Amino acid sequence: MKLNLRKLVAIIAISGVLALVTGCVDRGDTDEFVEISNGLAKNIGQLDDEAGVTLTGFASDPSTNVIQIGIGVDDKLIKPEQLKQIVDAYLENATTFTNEKDASKVLQPIELRIEEIGKVKDNFPVLAEKAAGSTEMTWN
């Protein structure tokens, strides 16, 4: 009888450890998303400070791992190449809260969309996007 009780206790202990480890891994992904999202949201003012940026917005959805950054742009003051540089600088500065120095690696697990806001009321044009798992931002 003792052998069976020992097996039962061992099975329960192993199950408990597995459940704990699995729970921590899932929460870690959510925590990472929230940390990245908070860093980007807190630094959105950097975009506001740029000449030619007329409006900014931020949205994130941890259930889909998507972050959307809205930017209103005065086309007379900012050319497309300048906008890329402004966004790159923002992303670099907004991810300095981590030990990783490369913003593209910090942002790799999330889907990121840069949308133009202020000209239309919905279905904002996508200026740039990065798929989850990728380190490359594609500009339209």
Image (cartoon, grey):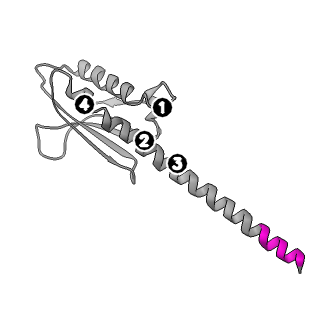
Q: Which badge, 4 or 1, is on the more N-terminal residue?
A: 4
Judging by the rendered image, the residue that carries numbered circle 3 is: 28
Judging by the rendered image, the residue that carries numbered circle 4 is: 45
Q: Which badge, 4 or 2, is on the more N-terminal residue?
A: 2
Neighbor class of circle 1 (other Cα within 10 Å; few <14, some 14-19, many 20+) is few
Report the amino acid beneath label 4.
Gly
Compared with residue 122, is residue 10 higher up or lower down, i.e. above or below? below
Neighbor class of circle 4 (other Cα within 10 Å; few <14, some 14-19, many 20+) is few
What element does badge 4 sit on? Answer: helix
Judging by the rendered image, the residue that carries numbered circle 1 is: 98
- Quadrant position of the N terminus in the picture: bottom right
Judging by the rendered image, the residue that carries numbered circle 2 is: 35
The magenta stretch is: 2-10
Q: CA distance from mark 1 to mark 3?
A: 15 Å
Compared with residue 79, is residue 27 higher up or lower down, i.e. above or below? below
Residue at image location 39% in from the left, 51% down from the top: 62
Neighbor class of circle 3 (other Cα within 10 Å; few <14, some 14-19, many 20+) is few
Q: CA distance from mark 3 to mark 2?
A: 10 Å
Compared with residue 1, is residue 28 higher up or lower down, i.e. above or below? above
The reply to whether callout 1 and callout 2 are in contact (CB within 8 Å) is: yes
